[in-house]
Image: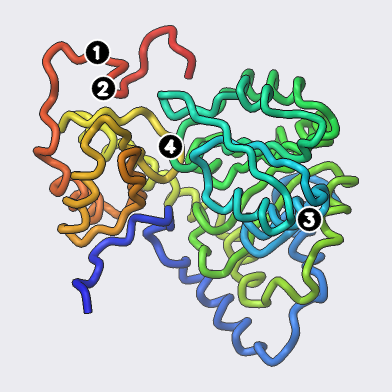
Amino acid sequence: MGVPVLHRLALNESPYPPLPSVRKAMQQAVAEAHRYPQFYPDELAERIAEWCRVAPDSVAVGSGSVGVALQLLQAVMEPGATMVHAWRTFDAYPLLATMVGAHAVPVALSPEGHQNLDALLAALDHGTRVVVVCNPHNPTGSRVAVDALSAFLRRVPRHVTVLLDEAYVEFAGDADPSDTPAFLAAHPNVLVLRTFSKAYGLAALRIGYGLGAPALVERIRRQQLPFGINAVATAAVKASLRADSELRLRVDTIVTERERLRHELVDLGWHVRPGYANSVWLAAPDPVDEGAAALTDARVLTRHYPGEGLRVTVGDRRANDTVLAALAGLRAPARGESLSARGEPVPGAPR
């Protein structure tokens, strides 16, 4: 057997277990495990709709956000169609395209780790049915500004569905439910994809949801697997929504630790740009391969893209201190290094 992992920082999981109130709700649901869940998760969709301040017919629920994404592709794709996405991105997207007989069209990120919206638009053609935008982006944590996103959406042809992946939106401080109804009304070809896996710490229970125009959501719901959302997960989500303020405190703690981790890495000489997910992104030409090896030696599991980058999930303080200790000394600060190179905001630069 190998050396056991000390800190699991590879999958952008929450470092915190479910709250006591959530665990209690899960235990109560387990006692009814001999009963089937709802045929379709209509009650849960209604609860999420109330929470997001949208109509119930604007919500689709699935097995994690990836499950909702698959339902969308099944609804709008036909064999041979194309799905355009940035690369890198969430690894599941090209796999999902293959599952529905479609072709994935990757578009390179900018050198700064941002999605190139103009290049994504240029890749759209008559055969494109879906374009994916992750905001914040996975794995780099970069963010698309509101104005840039609005301009992008205005230019996307109506025959193309925009899959707006907001799995990390809570860590960006952009989750304003009061804006959601107007946004969905203005963009009937957009599905906003969110999850309870990250900020709400329910990754193992596989619950995600999509917000969209009723006509689009109706098509997605036709792909819903009967009895596909289990009762324990449903109970955990409902309890989490009741404990929303407690969970927001956890998110604030993770964001504080993210910023501490980034600034201390910058002080060590790493060129870490601002990020808005629950991770930090270390990119080549910094010594990411050596960093991955050092973290492995420290028994820290991270997501390593050889020769390209290293995504480190923000853990608890002890885990983050272990990361800093492992990466110290691999890069010395360069003299005369600019603010932009050190990952600090440049006055007047787009955010």
Extreme residue toward the top, this view: 348
Q: CA distance from mark 2 to mark 4?
A: 16 Å
Q: CA distance from mark 1 to mark 4?
A: 21 Å
Question: Is tag 3's residue or tag 1's residue first in the polypeptide sequence?
Answer: 3
Question: Is tag 1's residue or tag 4's residue first in the polypeptide sequence?
Answer: 4
Of the two numbered discs 2 and 3 in the rendering, the one whose residue sits closer to the viewer: 3
Disc 2 vs disc 1: Cβ atoms closer than 8 Å?
A: yes
Nearest to the observer: residue 93 or residue 140: 93
Count residues near mark 1 (Cα–Cα under 10 Å), then give few for <14, some for 14-19, many for 20+.
few
What colouring does the structure picture have?
A: rainbow
Residue at (52, 42) in percent of width and height: 89
Q: Which residue is mark 1?
A: 338
Extreme residue toward the front, this view: 80
**SS assignment at label 1:** loop
| Amino acid type, callout 4 | Thr
Question: Is tag 2's residue or tag 4's residue first in the polypeptide sequence?
Answer: 4
| Amino acid type, callout 2 | Arg
The answer to whether residue 306 is above or below residue 70 is: above
Q: CA distance from mark 3 to mark 4?
A: 28 Å
Residue at (32, 34) in percent of width and height: 283
Residue 39 as seen in the image, left or right of residue 94: right
Q: Which residue is mark 2?
A: 342
Count residues near mark 3 (Cα–Cα under 10 Å), then give few for <14, some for 14-19, many for 20+.
many
Residue 232, horizontal then vertical, whole percent: 62, 76
Q: CA distance from mark 2 to mark 3?
A: 43 Å
Q: Which mark is residue 74?
A: 3
Q: Which residue is mark 4?
A: 140
